[in-house]
Amino acid sequence: MRTLRQLAVVSGVAFALAAASTAAQAEKLTIMVGGATKIIYLPAKLTEQLGYFKDEGLDVELLSQPAGVDAENELLAGAVQGVVGFYDHTIDLQSKGKEIEALVVFGQVPGEVEMVSTKASATVKSMADVKGKTLGVTGLGSSTAFLTQYLAQRGGIASTQYTLLPVGAGNSFIAAIQQNRIDAGMTTEPTVSQLLKTGDAKVLVDMRTLDGTRAALGGTYPASSFYVQRAWAESHKDEAGKLARAFAKTLNFIATHSAEDIAAKMPKDYYGSNKELYVAALKASLPMFTKDGKMPADGPQTVLKVLSAFNPSVKGKHIDLAKTYTDEFVSTLKTAAK
């Protein structure tokens, strides 16, 4: 009897050690964010700050890559498990034979703003006035490039009648405006609020809200999202589900808290010495976020329409939109996030 008890104790200890070892060896997941300090991608860092990754038992490392087109290359190479970037990359990559799907949709609108330099604003009153102008984008082949081309086309200006100049985001975008290297350009918060405060630029097209986006693009335009390779999602359903739940809890937190509350959770280097400006930028941006991470019904078709107009990889191709996203992993939260 004593031997049996001893065996039971030893077995119990061994089981506990094995469980602890398994927990300690939780697979590290690396997520590339297309510009971590951009408010359109705020849910990524906020999820980490709120502890929701750890609550799900995940070991997640966030890396920042200013251009989404570079982040997708890291994903395809297997260097990262997921990307926080624009949903339109899933459509572009399907046209190239790559199967990528968005598991969580952060933004139901782009959150992008076409800013015109104050110097050029006397003659550039709308996208119908950009003929002969130089327009800034984060990178050639980027989401901002396709959106810029589409807005110009809707204004009656052909893509051969202006110049696209890759100028990055944040401080490099601000410098391009201040140095008169671009007449107008597409950027996000908090850069928008910084330019408005200094008086260096004015808003030309505002896609931070549903109304503004529908007026500019003709429909809802899901943008910032979390996407992975479909094969990875299918072979790592547990991890995919936990990541989706963590992000969905964050979106619920955003929907139920003030800009001040959200800013208080962010690292100080995200707003520097001007927290007031950051809060103002957040307030202007909060309408862009979904409340549950699900794909807006009319969203994928609008994005496909924009890409089909200017992306040579997508134009004329059959795209199965149902394979570019899934709501399968997004949990519906019934209670307010902590």
Image (tube, helix red, strand yellow):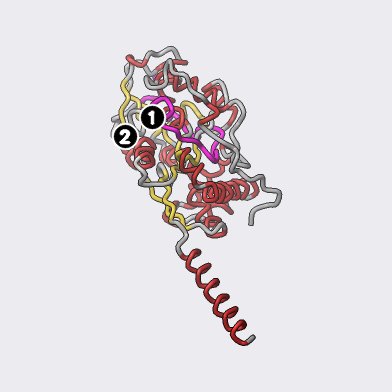
Give left or right: position of 23 versus 72: right
User: Can the viewer see residue 259 in this picture?
Assistant: no
* Camera-nearest residue between 21 and 116: 21
| Residue 227 place in picture, x, y as percent | 48, 39
Q: What residue sits right under mark 2 in the picture?
A: 167
Mark 2 lies on a secondary structure that is: loop
Q: Quadrant of the C terminus?
A: bottom right
Give left or right: position of 272 versus 329: left
122 drawn magenta: yes
234 drawn magenta: no
Q: What residue sits right under mark 1 in the picture?
A: 185
Mark 1 lies on a secondary structure that is: strand
- What's the magenta region? 94-123
User: Can the viewer see residue 141 in this picture?
Assistant: yes
Q: Residues within 10 Å of mark 1 (few under 14, many from 20)?
A: many
| Residue 153 place in picture, x, y as percent | 43, 15
**Alpha-carbon span between mark 2 and mark 1:** 9 Å
- At x 60%, y 31%, the residue is 296
